[in-house]
């Protein structure tokens, strides 16, 4: 696995990280055995960077990672997030120093670590200027609790405001072949400021897997159950497009998920995508995505098959998009 830098410093991590939201049952039930097998497989593929959050299973994802590291005597580089009020109503966020300190200390306890490499503000608390939030994060850095900080789902304008106070290590926003809005400013702003851009859901919440998900099998707690892109008639329309992409991948001898992830990596060497899975088998389909090299003809073919804006339906429902900073 090739390495890429986190922010404008010497900290290097695998170019593909592992998103650990599904460890907490976000897309269906999981267990410790399955999680440990997935983390073993990630290591075998050279993945040394994990992305988790306090809110994932109310700390369950962090606990499993902490148990794994203790059991295996192995330490991943870790990014986690705080700022969403655990157990609060949707859109209830707390970016105060006391709130973030409590969240961070809880995360460190569950991870069984003294510090994390990257700490994100998961969602903005609009009552507190982002400059004040950065000042709090700088304190955590000075105290040795974090090596760097970032923000999730913010705008380029907010990034620039934060970066004036102290260099931001990373920004995490959704980005994939069917979610392209970061191309309208965020990817460029990150490159200009030497901030790592971390695409989450780079495989479209499973739509770019080797088989299409079956919405009729989604559990009540599955995020996709009420997501516009997975509801008819949008779902079938999206599958029609992606079926043609799958044919292209097969013609090249590539997996669908590996190709979709390689496309994200191809958008700039300051991108570190975090595909999520709890399955070692699924991880094997994209674990070598960094080895896929595109020709100009490949890029043109992908652009023709999946043009920007092809997706039917918004990436979030009105209820799901609460608290996310929109800029275009």
Image: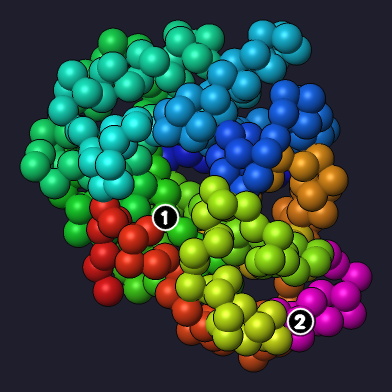
In the image, residue 134 sits, relative to residue 210, either above or below, namely: above
In the image, residue 104 sits, relative to residue 228, either above or below, namely: above
Kindly report which numbered mark, 2 or 1, lies closer to the viewer in this rendering: 2
Q: Position of residue 201 (x, y in %)?
A: 55, 56
* Principal secondary structure, stretch drawn in magenta: helix
Q: Is residue 245 magenta?
A: yes
The picture quadrant where one finds residue 85 is top left
Q: Residue at x 39, y 43 (%)?
A: 170
Q: Residue at x 76, y 81 (%)?
A: 243
In the image, residue 257 sits, relative to residue 31, either above or below, namely: below
Image position of 181 (left or right of 34): left
Q: Position of residue 4 (x, y in %)?
A: 58, 43
Image position of 34 (left or right of 186): right
Image position of 39 (left or right of 191): right
Image position of 218 (left or right of 89): right
Is any atom of residue 274 visible in this view? no
Numbered tag placed on residue 173 in the rendering: 1
Numbered tag placed on residue 229 in the rendering: none
Q: Is residue 130 magenta?
A: no
Q: Residue at x 36, y 14 (%)?
A: 105
Q: Secondary structure at mark 1?
A: strand
Q: Secondary structure at mark 2?
A: helix
Residue interval drawn in magenta: 242-255
Q: Residue at x 88, y 75 (%)?
A: 250
Asked whether disc 2 touches disc 1, contact meaning CB atoms under 8 Å apart, the reply is no
Q: If the image is split into quadrants, where does the C terminus sit?
A: bottom left
Question: Looking at the image, is mark 2 or mark 1 earlier in the sequence?
Answer: 1
Q: Position of residue 327 (x, y in %)?
A: 24, 68
Numbered tag placed on residue 243 in the rendering: 2
Crowding at mark 2 (Cα within 10 Å: few <14, some 14-19, many 20+): some
Is any atom of residue 199 visible in this view? yes
């Amino acid at each position: 696995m090739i390495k890429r830098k986190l922010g404008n410093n010497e900290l290097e991590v695998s170019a593909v990280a592992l998103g650990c939201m599904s460890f907490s049952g976000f897309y269906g039930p999981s267990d410790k055995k399955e999680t440990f097998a997935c983390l073993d497989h990630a290591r075998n593929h050279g993945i040394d960077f994990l992305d988790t959050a306090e809110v994932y299973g109310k700390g369950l994802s962090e606990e499993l990672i902490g148990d794994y590291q203790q059991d295996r005597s192995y330490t991943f580089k870790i990014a986690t997030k705080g700022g969403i009020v655990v157990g609060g109503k949707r859109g209830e966020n707390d970016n105060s120093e006391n709130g973030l300190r409590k969240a961070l200390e809880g995360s460190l306890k569950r991870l069984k670590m003294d510090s994390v490499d990257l700490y994100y503000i998961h969602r903005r608390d609009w009552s507190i200027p982002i400059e004040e939030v950065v000042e709090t994060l700088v304190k955590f850095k000075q105290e040795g609790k974090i090596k760097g900080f970032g923000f999730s789902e913010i705008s380029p304008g907010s990034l620039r405001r934060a970066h004036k106070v102290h260099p931001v290590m990373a920004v995490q926003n959704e980005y994939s072949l069917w979610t392209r809005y970061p191309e309208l400013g965020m990817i460029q702003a990150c490159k200009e400021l030497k901030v790592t851009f971390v695409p989450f859901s780079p495989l479209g919440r499973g739509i770019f897997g080797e088989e299409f998900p079956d919405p009729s099998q989604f559990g009540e707690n599955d995020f996709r159950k009420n997501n516009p892109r997975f509801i008819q008639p949008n779902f079938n329309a999206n599958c029609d497009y992606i079926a043609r992409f799958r044919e292209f991948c097969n013609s090249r001898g590539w997996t669908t998920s590996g190709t979709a992830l390689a496309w994200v990596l191809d958008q700039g060497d300051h991108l570190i995508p975090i595909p999520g899975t709890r399955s070692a088998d699924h991880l094997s389909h994209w674990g070598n995505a960094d080895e896929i090299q595109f020709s100009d003809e490949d890029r043109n073919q992908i652009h023709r098959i999946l043009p920007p804006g092809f997706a039917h339906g918004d990436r979030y429902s009105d209820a799901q998009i609460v608290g996310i900073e929109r800029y275009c």
